[in-house]
Amino acid sequence: MINREDMLELTRRMTPARNHFDRIAGAYIDRDGDFDGSFNTHFQKLQAREKEKMLSIAKAVPFSRTNEELKRKKFPGGNPEEKALYQLLYGLLDCGLKNDALLDSLYDYIMERHASGRAYGILVFHGMYDIPRKSSAGEYQYESEEVYNYIICAVCPLAGEYEPGEPEAGFIFPAFSDRSADFTHIDIYRRA
């Protein structure tokens, strides 16, 4: 089960002033399911309006209805395909989305499984959240216990040309559990 408070802790940091994303990458897929271009840039290079839009998309995944739309899954499972995906996601996490060949592999994986019949975008965010320590009374202190290094992926229908709408699917890897990274699980989002 996903603890709603963990997800709310992440989303509270997804504002222009408190943002902890350092990179965003994405691909555009046309209505026939063919690749139509990609990008990969530092998150702070986005224009203010675009940054707010992208933050709202990233935030939609952890802010969704916990344990209904956003579900935790043991990861990887026993099959070789899941183990290969785990290695791919771990590689993307390790390089901070700076390896376009790994991103292309992720886009291909999603394109093979996401048949929507309309144009859509795949957006991938990399963040590093410096988790503040909590006192025994539950109050945040300034020093941190660990840094949560993670990826959020959002699959969004395109509202216009290269204009992503609200996410319809996505994931958070690794899962954020008990205020810490959980590399044995992935949180998968599917809009109800």
Image (tube, rainbow, N blue to C red):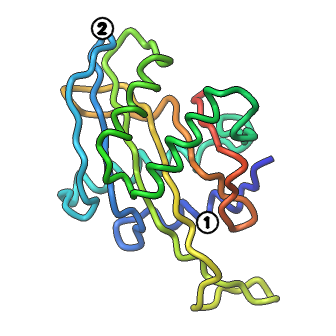
Label 2: few (<14), some (14–19) or many (≥20) C-alpha neighbours in 10 Å: few
Which disc number belongs to residue 9? 1
Res 22 label: none
Q: Quadrant of residue 96?
A: bottom left
Q: Is there CB contact under 8 Å for labels 1 and 2?
A: no
Tell me if residue 91 comes above or below residue 159 in the rendering: below
Taking depth in this image into account, of 148 and 170 the one nearest to the observer is: 148
Q: Amino acid at mark 1?
A: Glu
Assign a secondary structure to mark 2.
Answer: loop
From the top left corner, tell me how far across and down residue 123 is, in percent.
37, 40
Q: Residue at x 68, y 66 (%)?
A: 180
Secondary structure beneath dot 1 equals helix
* Residue positioned 46% across, 25% down in the render: 109
The residue sitting at 60% across, 43% down in the picture is 64
The residue at the point 57 percent across, 67 percent down is: 148
As drawn, 128 above or below 55: below
Q: Nearer the viewer, residue 130 or 101?
A: 101
Q: Which numbered disc, 1 or 2, marks the residue that appears first in the sequence?
A: 1
Residue 156 is situated, as x and y percent measured from the top left of the image, at 40, 31
Which residue lies under the disc numbered 2? Answer: 32
Q: Is residue 96 left or right of residue 64?
A: left
Q: Position of residue 18 (x, y in %)?
A: 41, 72
- Using residue 22 as the reference point, say whether residue 79 is left or right of it: right
Q: Quadrant of residue 137?
A: bottom right
Residue type of the residue flagged with mark 2: Asp
The quadrant of the image that shows the C terminus is top right
